[in-house]
Amino acid sequence: MELQLSDTMRTALDGLSDAHGDQVVEIRQSSSDTFVRVKRGAIVEVCRTLKEELGFIYLSDIFAVDRFTSEERFEVVYNLVSLKDRLRLFVKIRLEEENPEADSVYELWPSADWFEREVYDMFGVRFRGHPDLRRIYMPEDYDYFPMRKEFPLLGIPGSIELPSTTPDTE
Amino acid sequence: MSDKELTKQVTPKFFREHQESLYQSLEDKHTTVEMLEDADPLSTKMVLNMGPQHPATHGVLRLILQLNGEIIEKAKLDIGYLHRGVEKIAENKTYQEFMPYTDRMDYLAPYSNNVALCTAVEKIADVEVPERAHYIRMIGCELARISSHLLWLGTLVMDAGAVSFFIWTFREREKLYDIFDQIGGHRFTISHARIGGVANDLTPDAVSMIKDFVDRFPDELRDWHGLLDRNRIFIDRNAEVGVLKTEDALASGATGPTLRASGYAYDIRDFEPYARYDNIDFEIPTRLEGDNLARYYVRMEEMQESIRIIRQCLDKMPKGPVRADNAKQAYPSKDEVYYSMEGMIHDFMMTDTGICPPDGTECYHAVEGPKGELGYYIQSDGTGHPWRLKINSPSFANLQVLEDLLDGEMVADTVVIIGGVDPVMGEADK
């Protein structure tokens, strides 16, 4: 498919391919959003170039997609915003099913803290170099990752003990 | 107490690992926490739990504050008390079926949430929305913004110690509820937006009520400005409290009025205009101070701008249909459903399978909710259910900022700072 890019977006993508041409796997457009897929090991370097040279100083969100039956099951998507050029770019990496692990972008954007924790909590993707990778919604002793596709809609019965309703006797 | 390790001093009963890791994370950042048995509590370090059901936490937000005397050394937020799994629900519902759930996320501004989901679905499924529907949506969104800001204003002033003000802002909200009742038939969770337009047109009554509100509300705003802008107590509680510098705001991902009060005019209505915001004249209020008072001014001015936007929308609103006239994309009108077989079949099909965006497409669409950037990412697998639907909620981003914002502040100011950031837990804890 022919890409229909605005001039500023073309400049940004050219800048990215100049710096990390061999790391970019795919550039695609869907519903007028631009998605760049890079190799999983290169995410921090790519993000650094995007932030420091191409103006994407604002990280709006990080989220994951479970591709379930496909190869490389998990996809982590970074939602980057260039306030100067009024651009929004999505950078993706794909991770394998067994023990998914990616590098943390916390050192570039402190806002990645909670976003990465959410991805970890919901999908079990671990982030190397994250300062405080705790679960954010679920209790620490919960063994499952609720947003994975195999997690049943009704939850897993008896997976976590409910607090007793009898008041403390002290 | 000889035992310096905090985790050994506390004995959590439920969710032991969770509690321990929270305290552990406090310890990692700082020196050990001393809790001397006979010393003056104000001169020792202690860990204070606020919430999860503290009245000032706007829902179920738990703050774990490590204090040195009256100063907060480090704050940790625990938000997992309300997890409702809306994203998981979304993956098992059709797009239109999911729409009422969005009402219940940021329940202070349901209309903005409806519009956010519908515009995202329209973008991925390539649905054309009639002109009039855009204007109705904009009016609804701006009314929702005023309604949300009114509740924020009431609770902020209440947090600072004045209760009667809360009643006054609620009186105005009551009028807005009446308007929403006229627009969509509900007072609180309106669910008025439909994929491809809105459920029904504005009635003449609704239009006159909106006009009436738009005429009278600026006077109320002026009175409130008169009461608060030079109010010694209000200024002292808010000025230079919870200061967020521009670069910190950008780095820590603040959004909405919290970001704009720190000096960056990032507003989706202007950044990536949706609906017909590019036809409308409006300013983006910003402040440079980044403190709680700046956030107050930004939101107050936003209400003023919203009034301006509604006025222009009422003037520019063309006549015409309010929903896309394509039975494969949008619900048919009730007239067709009740009086024609075709209409009934289409209504059934829309409810049963709904709209099916092409396989493998993905899109992200954000609107400027009252609290900031509210975005929906949708990935489709060609069926009527989204394969993945991710909600980028402003309260979540702003609460993360709150964690840094509280460091170095006084305990007594926590409540006001939470009020200034204006989180809604239903949205943060999705």
Image (cartoon, grey):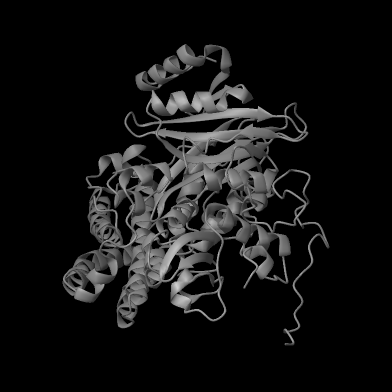
x 75%, y 56%: residue: A142
Q: Relative to B108, does residue B374 appear above or below in the rendering? A: above
Tell which residue pokes out farthest to the right in this image: A158
Quadrant location of residue B6? bottom right
Quadrant location of residue B70? bottom left
Q: Is residue B133 left or right of residue A17?
A: left
Q: Quadrant of the C terminus of chain B?
A: bottom right
Tell which residue pokes out farthest to the bottom in this image: A170
Please indicate, yes or no, whether residue A111 appears anywhere in the rendered image: yes
Horizontal and vertical percent for residue B295?
A: 30, 58
Tell which residue pokes out farthest to the front in this image: B2
Q: Observer-nearest residue: B256 or B150?
A: B256
Please indicate, yes or no, whether residue B105 appears anywhere in the rendered image: no
Horizontal and vertical percent for residue A25?
A: 60, 17
Horizontal and vertical percent for residue A160?
A: 78, 62
Horizontal and vertical percent for residue B72?
A: 44, 64
Q: Observer-nearest residue: B169 or A98?
A: A98
x 72%, y 87%: residue: A170
Q: Relative to B110, does residue B288 appear above or below in the rendering? A: above
Q: Relative to A112, does residue B208 appear above or below in the rendering? A: below
Please state the total of marks drawn on the protein image: 0
x 36%, y 21%: residue: A8
Q: Observer-nearest residue: B179 or B416?
A: B416
Q: Quadrant of the N terminus of chain B?
A: bottom right
